[in-house]
Image (tube, rainbow, N blue to C red):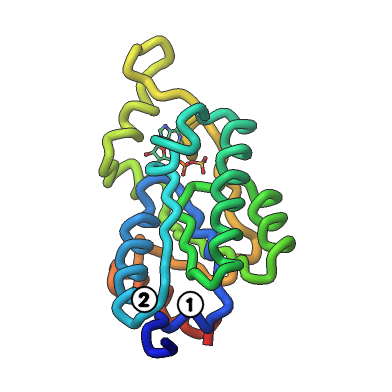
Amino acid sequence: MKNMMTKNSFCDGLFIQLTGMSGAGKSTLAKKVSKELQDRGYRVEIIDGDVYRENLCSDLGFSEIDRRINIQRLSFVGKLLARNGVIVIMSAINPFEDLREKIKNEDNRARIVYVKCDLDELVRRDVKGLYARALLPPGNPRRIEDFTGISSPYYEPANPDLTLYTQHETTSECAERLLEYIMGEIE
Ligand code: ADX
């Protein structure tokens, strides 16, 4: 019976708030690190803002209040899973410092990992084409309103547990550092 259990049937669980602006690399890092942890026998769950906005949070937009409700729902699920021994990586913009800190202070399994990238680089990359649309003049029907970093604030974490500067480090380097950090926290 014991041999049938995955490794972190015995681990305490961890809840990583991977925060940063759209396009900074959160989802890519979450996927890479999650795969590596699963290969090592750990139970992992990614809670991705884009994915949850298609189901559990499909009623929400991007006003401050909706973003707060979004993060509250995501972290409710995340904390529940972490409590049951899962390593949870929540990949969402999660732009409000007070809310990130509140989540962290209420749960000793919760951490804040800042996926940092400067706005000019995000606009230059614009992987999803959203920054270009957010920068369109008011009145343009294709313009996206309340866009993080353009027309809606992102408050940088003041005291993150880890910062991954995706602009200056490769994806592999960032993934390696995140993996090392997680391993250090669960062992
Ligand atoms: S959060 O602010 O509530 O944490 P969340 O991570 O769930 O945001 O969703 C962000 C994703 O929604 C972005 O990666 C992007 O693909 C998409 N998106 C659509 N509109 C916006 C917007 N106005 N601001 C930010 N992201 C947006």
Residue 49 coordinates in the image, percent (x, y): 44, 45
Residue farthest toward the front in the current orientation of the protein: 1
Residue under the image location 51 percent in, 61 percent down: 114
Instruction: Kindly identify the residue that appears in the image at 35 percent across and 70 percent down.
Output: 33
Q: Element at badge 1?
A: helix
Which element type, helix, strand or loop, lies under badge 2?
A: helix
Q: In the image, residue 148 lies at what x, y percent? A: 48, 38
Residue 82: x and y, percent? 56, 66
Residue that appears at 32% across and 18% down: 142
Instruction: State yes or no: discs 1 and 2 in contact (Cβ < 8 Å).
Output: yes
The span from disc 1 to disc 2 (Cα, nearest Å) is 9 Å
Q: Nearer the viewer, residue 62 or 77?
A: 77
Tag of residue 166: none
**In the rendered image, which residue does mark 2 sit on?**
37
Dot 2 crowding, Cα within 10 Å, few <14, some 14–19, many 20+:
some
| Picture quadrant of residue 14 | bottom right
- Ligand 1 resides in the quarter of the picture at top left
Three-letter amino acid code at the position of disc 2: Leu
Please give the name of the residue rendered at 31% of the width and 31% of the height, measured from the top-left corner.
132
Identify whether 54 is placed above or below 29.
Answer: above
Mark identifier at residue 182: 1
Where residue 35 appears, as percent x and y from the top left, is 30, 70
Q: Nearer the viewer, residue 166 or 53?
A: 53
Q: Nearer the viewer, mark 1 or mark 2?
A: 2
